Image: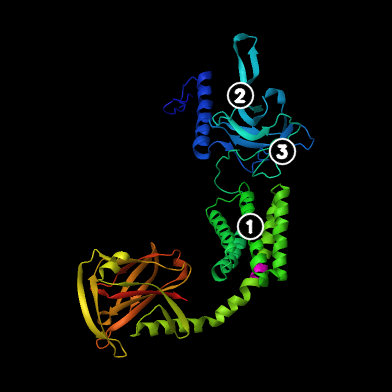
Amino acid sequence: MADDFKGFKRLNFFTGFQTTADDWNDLVRYQVEKHKLHNRLFHGPGVLPGALGGLKVAARGRADLSVEVATGYAIDGEGNDIYVAEPEIKTLNPGDFKLPATAYLVVKYAEDLTDFVSYKANLEYKGHRRVAEKVKIDWIITEPDIAREVELCRVQLTKDVKRITDAKDPAEPKANEIDLRFVPAAGVVGTTLAPAMLRDLQEMLGDARQVYGHMFHSLRILTASDVLNTVSSLDLFMRLGLVDKRNLPSLFEMLFDNQEALIQDVEANYPQFSSKKEFASFKKHVELLQNMFQEGGFSQEFLVNVVGYQKKSTENLTTIFSAKLKQKAREAEPAALGASEAVLEKLKVRSDELGPTLDVEGVKLKLSDTIDVLEKRSEADHKFRIVDARDKYRTRQKLKYPDGVIVEDVGVAFEGGYAEWECSNIVPNKDVIVLMRTDYVHGDWEAEVTVNGKKIPNCVCKGDDRRFRWRNWPFKIPAEYVGDTFLSIRLTPITADRDVNLFRLWFYQPA
């Protein structure tokens, strides 16, 4: 079917339909063109990674100008299937090129009419009974055109080229070395990994995510974040069904490289950890996996080794970094929670000036920012505003804190809509305690809070007090939501028929 056709027509058989050779050829052509259309739109052109030998090009080890092309499967830009059933040796002839030059090894789809037959009884009845689908592998000098050919490798040839070799560094091949960086890959969906192996991989990634997350978030070992991101991404691909033999090698390579960087960081900056025997075991396992990977040949045995060694590595790191710390965290959790609540309760009723630094119940806090509501410069600097309120009004109050100290302040009250503002001078990855001076006679409200577009736990103002009405009502922004030096905060009341009032805001972080 021509490229400019505007639709498909299928043969429709019925009783008495007298078919001709053209009808049957149309039937075959319909099936072929539909298959090619599917290939073009759903897979795209390129080599199918992991199929058979992956059409991998390698030097022959004979110090000559020949290479070996492994078996494999590819799709060209027209959607043709390119199937190489047997390895093929291709020798480059320097005389075909004006050196120095870049030579490209490409594979092309080809068709040949075969099995010719003629009938002696009637010589008009003759023709080829089959169409052989073939491939041609050739060296060319022009940049490959993906519409009609698929690149398998390229080589930058020098004038005195004597042999072609595998690249010592595949990421940066030198002259006369095989360059595989520009080989296109056809798209594939689904996985051929066994269910048991998928389960083992998911367990391995789940355990690894915990220990590397602990190393980064709790111990602040920054290079652990790269390993954590790689593990989390791999876990995400697993859940989407996108991990298969074709892409696992490159994913594992990234994991091994990031683990190597982590090892170097710990050895240089954390001797208390690198001196442990478990760390030496972890390092050895990573080195073994890197060596296996560099030797080439992704196999089931290699995959089993990766899972086994990574599980053991996670156990070693858990022993070093997590076991005792987790135990201490479990023991200290009730006390820590109580201390945190005690600090917030003290701050809530504090009438003294909330200065640049505070020491409350042994907890040292540092002021990052403050907003004086209804003071024009302060509101403008912090982009403070009330949006879409059903009712909004200024209020000046001269009220008491629970200790009897009288404070006069001016603020704003609103019902419906939301309040939003920005605060700066924030230290990332640390909790932020927000204190809001409010008239507590209007308590018993709840509000949703978002920080830089992400929802955090609601702010709940429980109870009220008609005698001692001032409170510095607190809510905490957990460290995992503090990812920048400034925060954009939105407070949206969700309690019906209750107004929220704000007079002043303070933002503290652990000193």
The residue closer to the viewer here, 199 or 211, is 211
Disc 3 versus disc 2: nearer the observer: 3
- Residue occupied by mark 3: 58
The one nearer the camera, 244 or 439, is: 439
For this view, does 311 lie left or right of residue 184?
right
Question: Which label sits on residue 56?
Answer: none
Q: Which mark is residue 111?
A: 2
Q: Which residues are magenta?
A: 314-318
Secondary element at image label 3: strand
Mark before the other along the chain sequence, 1 or 3: 3
Q: Is residue 232 above or below residue 83?
A: below
Residue type pointed to by label 3: Ala
Reply yes or no: does residue 28 show up in magenta.
Answer: no
1 or 2: mark nearer the eye: 2
Left-right relation of 187 to 446: right
Q: Position of residue 472 (x, y in %)?
A: 33, 80
Indicate how the structure is coloured in the image: rainbow
